[in-house]
Amino acid sequence: MSTALNGLSHYPIVQAPMAGGASCPPLAAAVCEAGGLGFLAGGYKTADGMYQEIKRLRGLTRRPFGVNLFMPQTAYVEPAAVEAYRGQLAGEASWYDTSLADDDIVGTADDGYDAKLAILLEDPVPVVSFTFGCPSADVLTRLRAAGTLTVVTVTSVEEARTAQAAGADAVCVQGIEAGGHQGTHRDDPQADGTGVGLLALVAQVREAVALPIIAAGGLMRGSQIAAVLAAGADAAQLGTAFLACPESGAHPLHKKALTDPLFARTELTRAFSGRPARGLVNRFMREHGPYAPAAYPQVHHLTAGLRKAAAAAGDPQGMALWAGQGHRLTRALPAGELVEVLAAELAETQMRSV
């Protein structure tokens, strides 16, 4: 692993920060203790909620770990488009006997970024990563001065160059295969579905910037980790692979759906959040995806009650079942054991290639 990443973990294996509850302290701690780099997801939490999870994780491991933040969203969202989608979802609210979010919609677009950043500057953690944009050079400099390594999620060569120019210590290169939200810096509906596959993107970014690369997108086996390392990455980030672990905070229905033949494929959709995100194709995605506007996080807040009610009703057809393209390769192993299996597969693949 490159110098900037040395000492963070024994293996070049990073557990992705999955917002919404999956990346909880027990999961991150188990990954860290097994020799990987565990991550907490700061997204959708209050600043205090994030801080309490950090405190809990510190009580479970002394190994380095990371925290991910969502960048504030500044793009204009057309209120009429959100209201039209509210009408589209009226039948869902009736079916699940719940209500949609209020008209004032519905939360803020900054995800408490400033308050979370203040906590991470006052009480630093080893690694902070960013999704949906690149922080200012000043923010990255202040974090570095606090002893924190910074990682910016990128989905293109242009975004990687922006991260390098701003002073990021590393980039997380996300291929289109990745589960959950695409971490694009600009939400452009005209670019939906045009992302680049991970291996091609890692090679392109490797030639464009001098930063360490963490590769993310559909990785489920140690042999795939070996492939991205050979392509120029310094570490591999896996999310879906850890979703089914017993330590994961993912809903049991979500874990089960990953290998359920009923959910045979994934697609990118705006149906649940208003931003492109990859999940298992279900009824909600099929019926509402074509009508969902480019309105994040407004749509996320609008559908939050529906998703919660669907889970309470035991209905995965109404849930956001985020998953990468490799979901059928999921193994429901304890997280520490999964890290060890991945590391063994990686070592075996690398030995064969010598």
Image (spheres, rainbow, N blue to C red):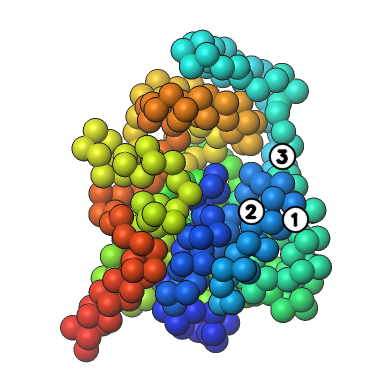
Residue 206 location (% of width, % of height): 46, 74
User: In which quadrant is the C terminus drawn?
Assistant: bottom left
**Circle 3 — which element?**
loop
Up-down relation of residue 15 to residue 42 (above or below): below
Find residue 256 and report its image quarter.
Answer: top left
Up-down relation of residue 88 to residue 155 (above or below): above
Number of marks drawn: 3
Q: Label 1, label 2: how many angstroms apart (C-alpha)?
A: 8 Å
| Amino acid type, label 2 | Gly
Q: Label 3, label 2: how many angstroms apart (C-alpha)?
A: 14 Å
Q: Is residue 221 visible?
A: yes
Find residue 158 and report its image quarter.
Answer: bottom right
Residue at the extreme left: 352
Q: Residues within 10 Å of mark 2 (few under 14, many from 20)?
A: many
Q: Which mark is residue 42?
A: 2
Residue 260 location (% of width, % of height): 25, 39
**Circle 2 — which element?**
loop
Q: Which mark is residue 109?
A: 3
